[in-house]
Amino acid sequence: MSPDRQSLEPAAAIDAADPLAGFRDEFVHADDEPDLIYLDGNSLGRQSLRSAAAVVEALEVQWGRRLIRGWNDGWFELPRRVGDQIAGLVGASPGEVVLADSTSVSLYKAALAALGARPGRTRILTDDLNFPSDVQVLRAVAAAAATNATNRAKTRKWFANTTTPAWTNASPQRRRSLASRRPSATSPSTCSPTTRARGPKA
């Protein structure tokens, strides 16, 4: 018996006895690459057979037939229901995990909310070992916070220049006219950002 066969047979026996061995058949394997060993699971794992069936069911039944009624059929509860399933994988209790947006989107919302809670802060600190996309997210948060601060200042100035009687005693038509002159929250800011993110140089 060749050395290669001697080394493969014990490994094959261990694989056969592995209680997880049957899960291989739960995933799609291309016919032209039956022996491909695919390890990139954290980015895009193999497609599971159950996920394909679930997508078809969501498209044809939940959306196709139930339409907007799907929200009352369980869509609203999905983040928590799936979160409870994930909780079992990470050692958490039911109700402690919720399915949310991507990491980048969640980081953006959390960081922007933190700045909004204390608008007087003017720096975001990070380190060079932070994940590159996280640094870019924080830079976007810094720019958004600076724009929001500028628009808040414009709004305060507008209200300061508007006497109270002119607003409270105005007719509905006059109020709409005054409101149309307020600075837009989405208008571009011309001042320099006052909040910066520190990260690796480009």
Image (cartoon, rainbow, N blue to C red):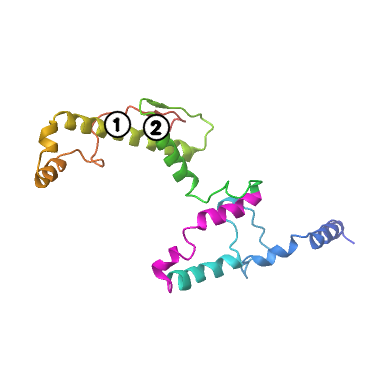
Is 69 magenta? The answer is: yes
Q: Give the label, 2 or 1, closer to the camera.
A: 2
User: Which disc, if any, is residue 21?
Assistant: none
Q: Nearer the viewer, residue 174 or 32?
A: 174
- Could you tell me the amino acid type at mark 1? Ala
Label 2 belongs to which residue?
A: 117
User: Is residue 153 among the parts visible in the rendering?
Assistant: yes
Instruction: Give the residue pinned by disc 1.
Output: 149
Q: Position of residue 90 (x, y in %)?
A: 64, 47
Left or right: 201 in relation to 35: left
- Relative image position of residue 197 (x, y in whole percent): 41, 30
**Residues packed near mark 1 inside 10 Å, few (<14), some (14 to 19) or many (20 plus):** some
* Quadrant assignment for the N terminus: bottom right
The disc, 2 or 1, on the residue closer to the chain's N-terminal end is: 2
Tell me how far mark 2 sits from mark 1, CA to CA. 12 Å
Give the residue displayed 49% in from the left and 63% down from the top: 74
Label 2, residues with CA under 10 Å away: few <14, some 14-19, many ≥20: few
The span picked out in magenta is: 64-89
Amino acid at dot 2: Ala
To which quarter of the image does residue 169 belong? top left
